[in-house]
Image (cartoon, rainbow, N blue to C red):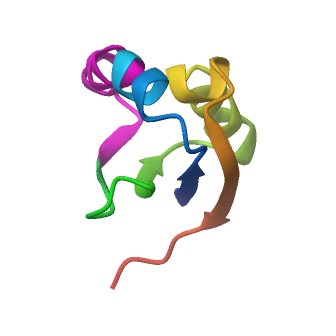
Amino acid sequence: MRVAYRYWMKDQPDRVHGRAEARRLLAHDRSARVPGRAVADRSGGLITLEVDSPEAAERVIAADPFVREELLEVSVVKPWVPE
């Protein structure tokens, strides 16, 4: 299944910047992660995940350095239907 992970960052640019490299490395290490992108103003982003279950998506998201460091204001995970 594919899910969309949409998130909005807290307004803490120094902390976000400090964790961005760790997040990029994690993205390359996770086979479930499909490349995503930040929005232009860096206030959030969208990542799609190819996973076996909703629980697997939650495990991948829980490993996100932005989640672990409590840098997200809001996040939403929804089923994704690519065309």
Residue 68 covered by magenta stretch: no
Magenta segment, prevailing SS (helix, strand or loop): helix
Question: Which residue is found at the position 27% from the left and 25% from the top?
Answer: 24
Direction right: furthest residue: 55
Residue 45: image x %, image y %? 42, 56
Residue 72: image x %, image y %? 63, 41
Q: Which contiguous range is marked in magenta?
A: 19-35
Residue 65 sits above or below residue 1 on the image: above
Q: How many marks do you count on the picture?
A: 0
Residue 34: image x %, image y %? 31, 46
Residue 45 sits above or below residue 83 on the image: above
Residue 48: image x %, image y %? 42, 55
Instruction: Tell which of 66 and 83 is nearer to you.
Output: 66
Question: Which residue is found at the position 54% from the left and 28% from the top?
Answer: 66
* On-image quarter of the C terminus: bottom left
Instruction: Tell which of 43 and 46 is nearer to you.
Output: 43
- In the image, taking residue 32 as reference, residue 41 lies left or right, namely left
Instruction: Tell which of 59 and 76 is nearer to you.
Output: 76
Residue 9 visible within the image = yes
Question: Which residue is found at the position 65% from the left and 34% from the top?
Answer: 56
Residue 47 sits above or below residue 21 on the image: below
